[in-house]
Amino acid sequence: MIPKRLVAPALLFVALFFLAPAQAAPNPAWTKPFPPFRIAGNLYYVGSEDLASYLIVTPKGDILLNSNLDSSPPLIRKSVEALGFHFSDIKILLISHAHYDHCAGSAEILRETRAKYEVMAPDVSVIESGGRTDFNYANDKSMRFPQAHVDRILHDGDTVSLGGTTLTAHLTAGHTKGTTTWTLDEPEAGRTPHVVIVGSPNVNPGYKLVRNPTYPRIAADYRHQFEVLKKLPCDIFLGAHGGYFDLTEKYPRFKAGDKNAFIDPAGYKAYIADRQQAFEAELKKQSGK
Ligand SMILES: [Zn+2]
């Protein structure tokens, strides 16, 4: 039994532990190294266990999707080099959305590679202000990240091409105003599977979906996102976090020889349906219905 004089401090400690913002104690899986590997064609995984980064290798240089945390660039570089590629060959840097867990490493990677930074229009000011114009976290210093200059402003449906590979940027807003879902078709063993890299369909704790003065159309944007995601043809299901597509469950199967481990159209559909249900439930709760 805990002595009475210790009960209050113990409760306070427990309360602080659970109330602390997630970013104060980042998920250990965000910084845990993960073996880099070729997913299909010229598409490689170079992220950590949960913060996904993708490298697309072409004869004209490489494209990197997601720079992750402030501390991630050395980890990403190590993964790129372990695969036998050069970090300095990265010519274009893209992101899933303008939150620090996907873009805080950008300033450093741009400095090291001199790549061009290409970002969906509504996320550009958030990137260039280091998070100060975020609709939800503008006043939360723990969500800030190093500012970076955007070289090309993307719009819904724009493509990014390099050395024969083309990625398409789909605006799937809600989680941020410029959340981007990337698609590409990867020729592999006589087939060309459709790859979908989901930006984020999640409603963060504290997000106001109703009467949000800094993002009045947030609920409509989420609804639009789900309509877009449901229509995308998907064979290889990927996303901004490994957790979206069960990376830690699929990778061991893949490594053991199941070359189709990431081919998961049913898992993609189920994930989108589950996230839409979570969004609708939260919207209903906030609408008081
Ligand atoms: Zn996010």
Image (cartoon, grey):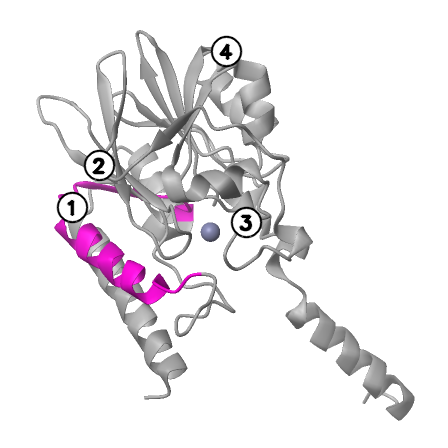
Residue 223 drawn at (x, y percent): 25, 63
- Marks 2 and 3, the one that precedes in the sequence: 3
Which residue has dot 1 on it?
Answer: 232
Point out the image quarter for the C terminus.
Answer: bottom left
Is 92 placed left or right of 12 in the picture? left
Q: Which mark is residue 157?
A: 2
Q: Nearer the viewer, mark 4 or mark 3?
A: 3
Q: Nearer the viewer, mark 1 or mark 2?
A: 2
Neighbourhood count class around disc 1 (C-alpha, 10 Å): few under 14, some 14–19, many 20 upward: some
Which residue has dot 3 on it?
Answer: 133
Viewer can see residue 25: no
The stretch in magenta equals: 215-242
Which residue has dot 4 on it?
Answer: 88
- Marks 1 and 2, the one that precedes in the sequence: 2
Neighbourhood count class around disc 2 (C-alpha, 10 Å): few under 14, some 14–19, many 20 upward: few
- Marks 4 and 3, the one that precedes in the sequence: 4
Q: At x 52% / y 52%, what residue is drawn?
A: 134
* Distance in Å between CA atoms under marks 1 and 4: 33 Å
